[in-house]
Image (tube, grey):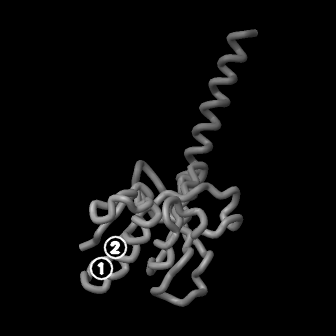
Amino acid sequence: DVILIDYYENINSSKLKPNAESWQVLGDVAKRLDGFKNIYPAPIVVFGQLKPAKDKDSVHIKERVQGRKIIIDKATCALEIRADKKEMRTEWIIHKNRFINSNTFGNSFFTGWVKGRYTPYDDAHRAFVNELRLKSLSKQTGETDANTSTTK
């Protein structure tokens, strides 16, 4: 089992507390999830949007969480996921991890991304990306040469 909660930042109202501000609602959600994880034996994965950072070290992850940042305090693990479309890979940045030692903070790892699926990011993936670049470049060069010869 796993519990997936997407668009955490869009949780903004409560039937129990209809007059609560959205930040109060998100604070209550974080507290309830923190308690629920102790009674139900399944991981709870919360997806939320981050405010963009100019570079990955410019603003702490906690300040970039849209909605209520308390979710980071309650989290067992916090990962930021960034797409690198040029290299057809995904960077997974570890911001918090209670599973293993704290030496992982700020470290990252990569997975490949091909046809909508995560793949190993290895020499074979890098060779595949380079091959695609060469094909694209030769196609562009071929089209340019053809255009040039017809205009002469």
User: Which residue type does callout 2 highlight?
Assistant: Ile
Location of residue 56 in the rendering, given as x and y in whole percent from the top left corner = 66, 64
Instruction: Note whether residue 114 is visible.
Output: yes
How crowded is the residue under tag 1: few (<14 C-alpha within 10 Å), some, or many (20+)? few
How many numbered callouts?
2
Q: Is residue 7 left or right of residue 151?
A: left
Mark 1 or mark 2: name the one nearer the start of the chain: 1
Dot 2, crowdedness within 10 Å: few (<14), some or many (≥20)? some
Q: Quadrant of the N terminus?
A: bottom left
**Residue type at the position of mark 1:** Phe
Badge 1 marks a residue whose secondary structure is helix
Where is mark 1, residue-wise? 36
Residue named by callout 2: 44
Which of the two residues, 21 or 53, is positioned nearer the viewer here? 21
Q: Residue furthest right?
A: 152
Can see residue 121? no
